[in-house]
Image (spheres, grey):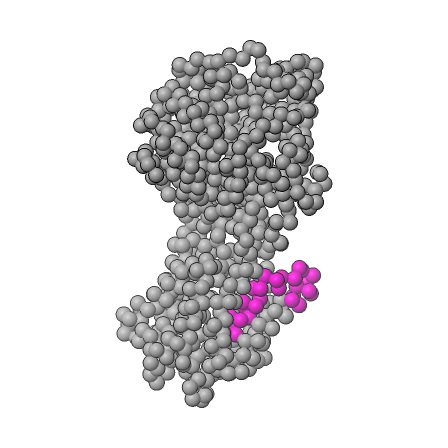
Amino acid sequence: MEHKEKLLRPKGNISRGVLLPHLKKTAEYETVVLKDVAEVRIPLSQHIGTPAEPIVKKGDKVFVGTLIARANGYVSAGVHSSVSGTVKGVEENANNGKCILIESDGAYETEPSLKTREVKTAKDLSLAAAECGLVGLGGAGFPTSVKLDVKDKQIDTLIINAAECEPYITVDYRECMDNFDDVLKGVTLVKNILKIPEAIICVESNKQKAIEKLLETVADDTIKIMMLPTKYPQGAEKVLIYSATGKKVPLGKLPSDVGCIVMNVTSVATLYRFITTGMPLVSKSLTVDGTAVAEPKNVIVPIGTPIKDLLEFVGVEGEVGLEIMMGGPMMGVAVADINSVIEKRNNAITVLKTEDKQAEGTHCIRCGRCANVCPMQIFPLEIERAVKNGRTEKLKELNVEYCIECGCCSFVCPAKIPLTADMRVAKQILRRETAK
Amino acid sequence: MNERLKVTFAPHLRHPDTTKGIMLDVIIALLPASAFGCILFGIRAFAVLVTCVTAAVLSEFIWNKILKKPNTLGDLSAIVTGLLLGLNLSSETPLWMAAVGSIFAIIIVKQLFGGIGCNIVNPAITARVMMLVSFSGAMTKFIEPVSDAVCSATPLVSTEAVSAKNLFFGMHSGCIGETSSFLLLVGGIYLVIRRVISPVIPVCFIGTVAILSLISGESLAVSVFGGGLMLGAIFMATDYTTTPTTTLGKAVFGLGCGLFTFLIRQFGSLPEGVSYSILIMNILVPYIDKLTLRKPFGYIKQ
């Protein structure tokens, strides 16, 4: 490998976490576009924060990129139409909450008022992210406009998250390979506008081609490339910051409190595309894969596309039980209804056959594996026991609030206890007790 | 298609290891030493092992039946308990005593506390201690394997010198499974490689006994290979349920076991102290766990 001087070694080594099968079979597949969608349901809440407020009514004619719901408050994000067609009303489903239903005319006409942006100041940049409706595309969905509004905090590192540590998912890798220019220009733009001295693009070691491409092409000395060990959850924000800078983000603090901004690689490219084309975030690239998928694909779909349409497109095998996740198999949320729709923050749809699942478990045997793999170094087994025995007063001293719900504890548990689910319950109990 | 969907919490991937697999690994690791014990001490030894395992399995099965609880034999933990108890007995133990020990281990020590994962002390160790107290005569009658003569002493208290080589490979009197340190080590290494156990407790336990014996002028070979140290340190002091979870906690536990073993052997009126020391440390585990609770990532004092 040439250009080795640009390749940084990780500054912090996270010794915990788990080794997972990579299963990235879609990595070298060409991304295809799915346009054959009769109607879309665009959720008002595709981000962390207050749901957007609808500004269209039944019967309105909309185009690709038309603002249909505006950000409601500071931590919120606007929502744009992903098709051209007619608004049919507002409906609700269990997985996505309230959605605006739009019947597509199939023409994909773009909104005539779209225009490029000129970004000169930090304020412009945050505003552009807001107008793009951009949220963290790695899965968390935190509004980018809020993330980029760092106020007077000193930022010394821009971390670009291209770790992509979940099995199956390859969309961020494809973004690096296919839209490399957008990525690089986006990184340069954010770095220059926010006057950040250094940017580090973090990629896991199982994506050698992306690393080589970055090393060959990046000419700017202030943009470094870091190869991280392939270990789950390398791409979790706190873990990534530690790997890239050796800094630990304290509980309840933001990355900017330790001088870092972390952006997903696709987010930064999307922001650049919005500034140069004026087209907000209306479509999303997804990996559709899993043991039940006949033809795994990377697909670009309009936001609001029902999962049903996507499954028809890739084909689902067999007649057995299925688990469909929005996201990867480690952190993805299982859906109960195939009419649920694709959101901005989705980077994958994973479809697993339930027969792949393990048989029943046992009582906790206190092997301690969950504690050994926990990247936050807490003790899932003790927390599970405290919840089970009703000893909720112990949850605080057991530090359950540090849990990032990465799923490592459940993954390794030989007794097959759903520990991650128990951690969520424990966090809710603690929050309720604290609120009292 | 919705009726085919199953909704569960993330993560949706699971590691293939199971409780049953772990127990099976422990059984596999114990097999060489068990086989050697049967060859060394003959059919009596085999009968003791079979009795212990059968009694353990049956008592767990019947307990669950009576209380209308799900059958838990599938996790294989009852077999492990029975086998470990048998290996800790002399081949001369009357079979009914062996059976009583197994029933005590499963019913009193394990099931009364809630079954697998809930007991606070190691079932096999506690059953052995109960038997030592109740049947002290029969429990300390051993066979001299070379001459087949009945003797009442293991190398720990015997005045007859046994060569270090014979001690290491197991050509001496003792409990069925404790004599061959070599085969126990092989089993221990297997468990470490399979990541079933961490080497911290055995290393600290055996290391402490070795160092203290050297300091006090005892024979190193006799102290380490002559009694139940290897069997106890590798297989009993590494029982998940009754030992600490953190590495620091494990180190403390191992050191404590080593210290108590030495003290009992040196100053107590008992010839052997491995079982008692593990039992004492088992009881201290909640305190060790509490004192060695590590700080989470990004910890801030509140």
- In the orientation shown, which residue stands out farthest toward the top? A113
A393 or A212, which lies in front?
A212
Q: Position of residue A19 (x, y in %)?
A: 47, 47
Q: Residue B64: say if magenta.
A: yes
In the image, the segment drawn in magenta is B61-87
Residue A216 seen? yes
Does A52 sit above or below residue A309? above
- Residue A315 is left or right of residue B206, and the answer is right
- Was residue A79 drawn as part of the magenta stretch in this picture? no
Give percent across and percent down for residue A272: 46, 21
Name the residue rendered at 36%, 33% in the picture. Answer: A215
- Quadrant assignment for the C terminus of chain A: top right
Quadrant position of the N terminus of chain A in the picture: top left
Q: Position of residue B148 (x, y in %)?
A: 45, 88
Q: Main secondary structure of the magenta part?
A: helix
Q: Residue at x 53, y 18 (%)?
A: A279
Residue A202 visible? The answer is: no
Looking at the picture, how far across and down is residue A204, in whole percent? 42, 39
Number of numbered discs present?
0
